[in-house]
Structure formats: structure tokens, C-alpha cells
Image (cartoon, rainbow, N blue to C red):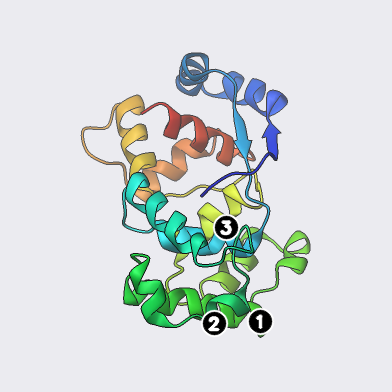
């Protein structure tokens, strides 16, 4: 996702994490300051999450650029813009037919009020995930990335993220990728700031 100028600093949370987990403390000292930049436009955050699925950052960035160029009068299209765009035009931007269906379903659910960003501030992480996975193409992982990179929720633990799993394997001495149970045992030390710990483990790779 492309961040805007919004960001969060986590000085107090980092100090607590370093105190509770010596392994994470070493990672934090190596990586340095944590700034989590946010994409505050919920529709854009989710649409880009769909476009980035199963692609390299470079390939996805190119496709997102071509996608946005379809709508020269907007910094990013609105749901109605996508619904009014012919599939073939989206295909020419490099978007697969499957992802076109996902984008249009996302657009419909925003317009129909099934996805309700104005209410997110009053909803728990699990309630938001439950709402988002009603959209075609959005599973729990994508919803968790949205919680982190759009909403800035501080206690998200993406146990299914491969990069996160590999970092835990490396730093916590597992011979194979850790199981969900093993990850959750380690993460007990990070609560209620699992997002910050996750960010550092991603950056440690």
C-alpha cells in the first residue's frame, strides 16, 4: 500500500517491548525507530491490498500506477468510478479478471453500506475483519494488513504472514516455520502491542 504523510511513533510501546522480550530488544536496536505510515483512505487501502495480492512490489506498483492513470481527474478512483469502468479497460492496465471482480465487489459493498468505514472507530479488530471478509478476494490476511496499515491498530498478530513466520523462525531459533500455536505463545510477551513487534520482525529480514 502506498502510505500518505500520516504516521505513528511508538516510543513508549517500544520501551515496554524491549523490557519484556530480549530477542525483540536486539531486533529493535538493529532496526532503529519505528514509524508506521498509514493510508487513511479506507477504500484506497483495500483496493490496493487487492491489487498487490500475489505480486511482487515492483509489478504491483506498476499496475497500480496504470490503474490510477485511468482516472486522470482523481488521485484515486471512487467506488462508482470503478463500477462504471469497462472490464476490458481495467484488463489493459494489467489487472486480472479475478481481481477486477474483487475490485467491483469491493466497490459495490462500499456503496451498499456493507463495508462501513465511518463505524470502524467504534468496532473491534475482529468485528472489522468479519465485515471485510464479506468482500470477494479479501481474506483474514488482507483484512489484518488493513487493520495495520490503514487503521493503525496496535495489537494485530498476522499469524499467516509468511515473512513474519520466517522472521520468527530466524530470531527465535526454530528449525522449521513456527506453528500458529508457537507464534501465539511468543506473542504473549508483546501484548497489547503485537503490531509494533510484527513491524520490527518484518523489518529485520
The answer to whether 168 is drawn above or below residue 55 in the figure is above
Instruction: Give the alpha-carbon distance from disc 3 to disc 1, as whole Å.
Output: 16 Å
Label 3 sits on a secondary structure element that is helix
Q: Between residue 48 and residue 163, name the one nearer to us.
A: 48
Question: Label for residue 83?
Answer: 2
Residue, far left: 175
Q: Between residue 44 and residue 155, name the one nearer to us.
A: 44
> Where does the image place residue 45, in percent across and percent down from the top left?
57, 58
Question: What residue sits right under mark 3 in the picture?
Answer: 45
Q: CB of mark 1 within 8 Å of CB of mark 2?
A: yes
Q: Residue at x 64, y 77 (%)?
A: 110
Name the front one of labels 2 and 3: 2
Question: Label for residue 111?
Answer: 1
The answer to whether 122 is drawn above or below residue 115 in the figure is above
Instruction: Give the alpha-carbon distance from disc 1 to disc 2, as whole Å.
Output: 10 Å
Residue 188 visible (yes or no): yes
Of label 3 and label 1, which has the lower sequence position? 3
Question: Label for residue 73?
Answer: none
> Where does the image place residue 124, in percent across and percent down from the top left?
69, 61
Residue 160 visible (yes or no): no
Of label 1 and label 2, which has the lower sequence position? 2
Q: Residues within 10 Å of mark 3 (few under 14, many from 20)?
A: many
Q: Which residue is drawn at 58% across and 63% down?
A: 72
Of label 2 and label 3, which has the lower sequence position? 3
Amino acid at each position: 500500500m502506498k502510505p500518505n504523510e500520516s504516521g505513528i511513533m511508538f516510543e513508549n510501546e517500544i520501551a515496554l517491548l524491549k523490557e519484556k522480550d530480549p530477542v525483540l530488544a536486539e531486533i529493535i536496536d538493529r532496526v532503529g525507530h519505528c514509524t508506521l505510515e498509514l493510508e487513511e483512505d479506507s477504500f484506497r487501502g483495500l483496493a490496493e491490498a487487492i491489487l498487490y495480492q500475489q505480486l511482487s512490489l515492483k509489478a504491483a506498483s506498476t499496475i497500480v500506477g496504470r490503474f490510477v492513470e485511468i482516472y486522470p481527474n482523481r488521485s484515486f478512483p471512487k467506488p462508482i468510478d470503478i463500477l462504471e469502468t469497462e472490464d476490458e479497460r481495467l484488463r489493459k492496465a494489467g489487472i486480472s479478471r479475478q481481481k477486477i471482480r474483487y475490485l467491483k465487489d469491493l466497490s459495490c459493498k462500499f456503496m451498499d453500506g456493507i463495508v462501513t468505514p465511518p463505524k470502524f472507530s467504534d468496532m473491534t479488530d475482529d468485528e472489522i475483519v468479519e465485515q471485510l471478509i464479506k468482500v470477494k478476494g479479501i481474506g483474514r490476511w488482507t483484512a489484518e494488513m488493513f487493520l495495520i496499515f490503514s487503521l493503525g491498530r496496535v495489537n494485530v498478530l498476522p499469524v499467516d504472514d509468511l515473512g513474519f513466520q520466517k522472521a520468527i523462525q530466524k530470531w527465535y531459533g526454530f528449525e522449521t516455520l513456527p506453528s500458529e500455536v508457537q507464534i501465539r505463545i511468543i506473542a504473549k510477551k508483546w501484548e497489547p502491542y503485537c503490531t509494533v513487534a510484527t513491524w520490527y520482525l518484518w523489518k529485520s529480514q
